[in-house]
Image: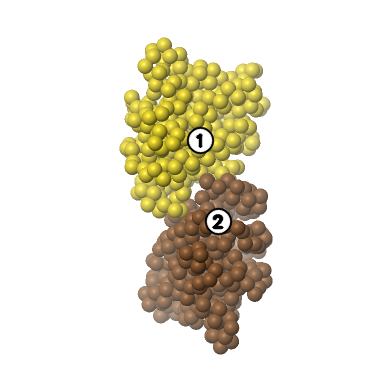
Chain colours: A brown, B yellow
Amino acid sequence: MAVVFSHCLYSSLSSSSSSSSSYLSPSLHSSKLSRRRVLSISASTTPFHMELHNEGRPKFIEFPYVSAPHRSLMSDLVSMVETHFDSQLLPCTLPPDVQYYQNQSGTSHASLHIRSGHVSSPIDFILGSWIHCQLPNGGALNITSLSAYLNSSTDSPNFLMELIRSSPTSLVLILDLPPRKDLVLDPDYLQKFYEDTKLEAQRQLLEKIPEVKPYFSSSLYIRSVVSPTAILIRIESEKAERMEEIIEDHVGPVAKQVLRLWLDKCASEKREVAETERDYLQKRDKLVRTKTIEIDLASSLPRLFGPETAERVMAAVKEYFSA
Amino acid sequence: MAVVFSHCLYSSLSSSSSSSSSYLSPSLHSSKLSRRRVLSISASTTPFHMELHNEGRPKFIEFPYVSAPHRSLMSDLVSMVETHFDSQLLPCTLPPDVQYYQNQSGTSHASLHIRSGHVSSPIDFILGSWIHCQLPNGGALNITSLSAYLNSSTDSPNFLMELIRSSPTSLVLILDLPPRKDLVLDPDYLQKFYEDTKLEAQRQLLEKIPEVKPYFSSSLYIRSVVSPTAILIRIESEKAERMEEIIEDHVGPVAKQVLRLWLDKCASEKREVAETERDYLQKRDKLVRTKTIEIDLASSLPRLFGPETAERVMAAVKEYFSA
């Protein structure tokens, strides 16, 4: 199971990120658009395409395989992000067979939903996903995630949340605002985004629950990518009811508060980023994405969905992560 | 007690470091020496000075206030370092009243021992210390530490170890090779010093002990400075005998193995460091020191030893940390 856990950290494939346009030279930053962004814009002005590309949305937002409190939390979080950014988010332009896919035997199902930010917004893209895999023991693995990535018009942290359930009494939670700079070299950044926001208090709220233990990712790179206030916990409850209570009363409120802090303090404004600083951000963001795709997706997707589907999904994801 | 803990993390004042000469321009790096290094060299060639400056050593190496297994571990670690570097280490040139000091009422005692590396070695300096403070409840706080800092002729990680005992049944252990680069930007560095060395296996050995819990420093900056395989644990045992057993059978072997790895893989050779890279190392090392002195020493020393002694010790330490 540990292997499945470590390789199924689906959204941690993307613990940090930047705009696809961030790989263009700074002077081209606002004037040139990558293929997937052009697709997004044409989709938003072409009703037929919009409908085509958005058809996976109901399936995504349904979170069909998880418990009611789990589903309700995910749906609330997606709604908070979409309400906050509203028209700044373009419709999802992923091909329908990437928005929803399954393996040949029908034991693994997944949904992926990515919405790019309008070129004038600090959002690069928002990624939501769920994976459901039947397990040989009769149980199921369910992973739901929501991540948000800012572009290089700002150096603010990204948002990352993932819930991993390998049974009704087991939960791994990854909840963080991964920094986009070396915190050791930038104490002001640490102060602004991690101390002044009192993120540590949120981490401590969950740490106090008796069933909570720390979670260590098997990847040292992923451990390096998260912030010093990252919530990385494993919860094992005696009964399934208790786990739903923990999600409803503790995980939910903390996740919403962390997302609120991110919306208010990180994603609310463009910051002035100098050109040299932008080069640094682009380099760091790009490295994080390349490494995390390599760590997470490259080995787990083929295993869960077969090589053909894995290749199709990987290619679509890379449009955003390695553009 | 939590406040005392967080501010008494004596040697974590220095979780990373570089040579005093690192603050000279690169071209002067090998030819010009700071005041404290000149003192070191003159001490090593002047028997009178050597004797004067080394007189605190017996008191330091005695670790007089801690239990036998604790003392034996510290003494073994100091001996491993001194044997490995041998003539590369110059004698301690700290003033006698910094090598050993106490507060006016005689309830707090401390020893500090710093040995610079020879100018031709990759060692900047080795710092050992112990602090003993009587507590109002009749107990005592004992902190022992050993740290080793490489200069900017290499980018290899430093060594950091600290044992904090606030009672015979309580122990906080900080044991790490703090990186000197942003690991997110340098996966090869992460691979070489943290994955290939299998440091994670050492962390897991201690994590398995039932009495072990994770320890979170109250300083987010200190959390950012340590590596993804850092051993940051709090141990609470029911009986004092059990704690001594844990130190002897578990903490000791792991600490020695981590130090061995550091001696073999990090401190054994000078590496080729390009000039731009050296500027980066010097900047990062300097920031880490400044911040950590500010976090740890500036508030705890005056409280434990009075303002006058604190000022004297701080000034001497800054010769090494902010030179």
CA distance separating discs 1 and 2: 32 Å
Residue A132 appears anywhere in the view: no
- Who's the residue at 50% across and 55% down the image? A276
Front-lying residue, B149 or B210: B149
Q: Tag 1's secondary structure?
A: helix
Front-lying residue, A55 or B239: A55
**Is A312 left, or right, of A234 in this rendering?**
left
**Is A252 left, or right, of B155 in this rendering?**
right
Same chain for the residues under marks 1 and 2 in the image: no
Query: Tag 1: residue type?
Result: Ser
Front-lying residue, B34 or A131: B34
**Residue found farthest to the bottom:** A48
Residue B91, image x, y percentages: 41, 21
Which residue corresponds to mark 1?
Answer: B14
Residue B33, image x, y percentages: 42, 27
Q: Tag 2's secondary structure?
A: loop
Specify the quadrant of the image occupied by residue A116.
Answer: bottom right
Residue B286, image x, y percentages: 50, 38
Query: Tag 2: residue type?
Result: Ala
**Residue found farthest to the front:** A27
Total numbered badges shown on the rendered structure: 2
| Number of other residues with Cα within 10 Å of mark 2, as a class: few under 14, some 14 to 19, many 20 or more | few
Residue B40 appears anywhere in the view: yes
- Who's the residue at 49% across and 58% down the image? A279
- Who's the residue at 61% across and 18% down the image? B106
Q: Which mark is residue A274?
A: 2
Q: Is the residue A271 above or below the residue B30 in the image?
A: below
Q: Chain of mark 1?
A: B
